[in-house]
C-alpha cells in the first residue's frame, strides 16, 4: 500500500511541476495553505536533477521548507539530496534564483514549526503520524540566475 501511495504522490508531483512551470505558479502555486516553490536538487546517488513542488513560507530573507514526506517514517529523497549537496536552484512563480539549503537547528526549528502550524495546521497530523522529528530547511538565496 505504501508503494502505491508513493507512486501516486510522484505522479501528482510531476503534474504539479508541469503546470506550475507553464503558468509561473498560477496553477499548482499553493499547497495546504502555503505557497509553493520548485527546488531543483541534485540526486546524491544518480547526479540527476530533481524537481519537487514544496510548500514554503518566508523566513529572514530566505524560504523555509518542510521535509514532512506526508508523515512517512523516512525523510523525503530531496532532503537527503540537499544534505549531500546544499546548492539548489529555485523557481518561485516566474523567478529563478540560486540558494543554499541549511537544515534548521533545534531552536530555530522549534520557532519555524510554531509558525508552520499556525499557517498550515495540517502539518500537525504529519508529525503525529511519524516518530521522526520532521526537519525544516531554510533556503538562503545567493544570487539570481
Image (tube, rainbow, N blue to C red):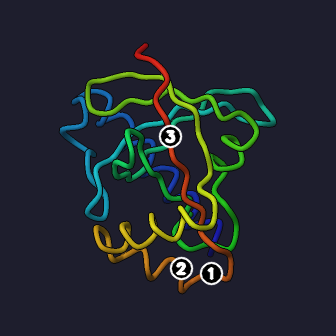
Badge 2 crowding class, 10 Å Cα cut-off, few under 14, some 14 to 19, many 20 or more, is: some
Quarter of the image that includes the C terminus: top left
Residue 114, by quadrant, is: bottom left
Q: Is residue 20 left or right of residue 98?
A: left
Question: Which is nearer the N-term, disc 3 or disc 1?
Answer: 1
- The label on residue 49 is none
At which x and y percent is residue 56? Answer: 38, 51
Residue under label 3, please give it: 139
Badge 3 crowding class, 10 Å Cα cut-off, few under 14, some 14 to 19, many 20 or more, is: many
Residue under label 1, please give it: 130
User: Which residue corresponds to the image point at 42% horizontal and 22% vertical from the top-left?
Assistant: 97
Foreground tag (3 vs 1): 3
Which of these two is toward me, 9 or 40?
40
At which x and y percent is residue 10? Answer: 52, 51
Secondary structure type for disc 3: strand
Q: CA distance from mark 2 to mark 1?
A: 6 Å
- In the rendered image, the vertical position of residue 114 relative to residue 34, given as above or below: below
Quarter of the image that includes the N terminus: bottom right
- The label on residue 127 is 2
**Marks 2 and 1 in Cβ contact (< 8 Å):** yes
Secondary structure type for disc 1: loop
Amino acid at each position: 500500500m505504501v508503494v502505491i501511495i508513493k507512486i501516486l504522490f510522484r505522479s501528482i508531483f510531476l503534474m504539479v511541476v508541469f503546470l506550475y512551470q507553464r503558468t509561473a505558479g498560477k496553477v499548482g502555486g499553493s499547497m495546504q495553505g502555503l505557497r509553493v516553490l520548485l527546488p531543483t536538487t541534485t540526486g546524491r546517488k544518480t547526479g540527476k536533477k530533481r524537481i519537487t513542488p514544496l510548500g514554503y513560507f518566508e523566513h529572514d530573507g530566505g524560504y523555509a521548507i518542510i521535509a514532512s514526506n506526508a508523515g512517512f517514517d523516512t525523510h523525503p529523497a530531496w532532503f537527503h539530496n540537499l544534505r549531500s549537496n546544499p546548492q539548489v536552484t529555485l523557481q518561485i512563480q516566474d523567478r529563478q534564483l540560486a540558494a543554499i539549503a541549511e537544515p534548521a537547528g533545534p531552536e530555530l526549528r522549534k520557532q519555524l514549526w510554531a509558525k508552520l502550524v499556525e499557517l498550515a495546521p495540517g502539518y500537525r497530523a504529519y508529525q503525529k503520524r511519524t516518530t521522526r522529528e520532521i526537519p525544516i530547511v531554510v533556503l538562503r538565496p545567493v544570487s539570481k540566475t
